[in-house]
Amino acid sequence: MTMDTGASPTRRETTILIVENDPSDRLLLERVLSSRGYRCFSVAHGREALDLLERMQVDLILTDLLMPVLDGQRTAQLIRSRPGMEKVPIVAVTAYPPDEIRGPGSGGSYDEYLLKPFKPRQLLDLVERLLTSRAS
């Protein structure tokens, strides 16, 4: 007899990279996503994200915008410029309104945005939608 954990096999195989310099926001994102069976890796800034992406592949990226070392906007642009990373969904997790995110310089680097503060359900719905549309 097997126990249903609520996480589908595809979730267990899905890897999400969290790029967030605020430890409490990073922990919240990790907890919400891992509670639904997603495999999460997190880093504190864009340079660490780029280094990690040299060693592994991810299915989705959540990134803050304002971070030390390398901000989220530049990080997303550099990720998009890498072969094989053009279609990986990138979500800007930010306190800024969408018009500022998608304004000059964003270069279409983000697929979506999630405004802080957010409800866990909002995060999960957004992640599910992006992963489902990517698989189609």
Image (spheres, rainbow, N blue to C red):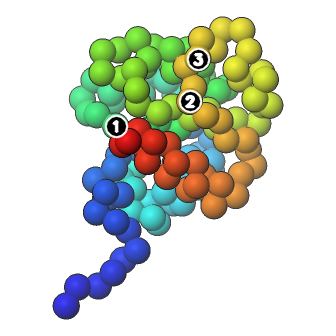
Q: In the image, is residue 82 above or below residue 134?
A: above
Q: Is residue 2 left or right of residue 82?
A: left
The residue sitting at the top extreme is: 105
Image position, residue 72 (x, y; %): 58, 24
Q: Pick the quarter of the image with the C terminus.
A: top left
Element marked by disc 2: loop
Image position, residue 45 (x, y; %): 52, 28
Residue at the image position 30 percent from the left and 15 percent from the top: 83
Q: Can residue 21 be seen in the rendering of this structure? A: no
- Residue receiving disc 2: 111
Element marked by disc 3: loop
Element marked by disc 1: loop
Q: CA distance from mark 2 to mark 1?
A: 15 Å
Q: Amino acid at mark 1?
A: Val
Q: Is residue 4 left or right of residue 35?
A: left
Q: CA distance from mark 1 to mark 3?
A: 19 Å
In this orientation, which residue lies closer to the viewer: 29 or 6?
A: 6
- Residue receiving disc 3: 108
Q: Is residue 94 left or right of residue 37?
A: right
Q: Nearer the viewer, mark 2 or mark 1?
A: 2
Q: Amino acid at mark 3?
A: Gly
- Residue receiving disc 1: 58
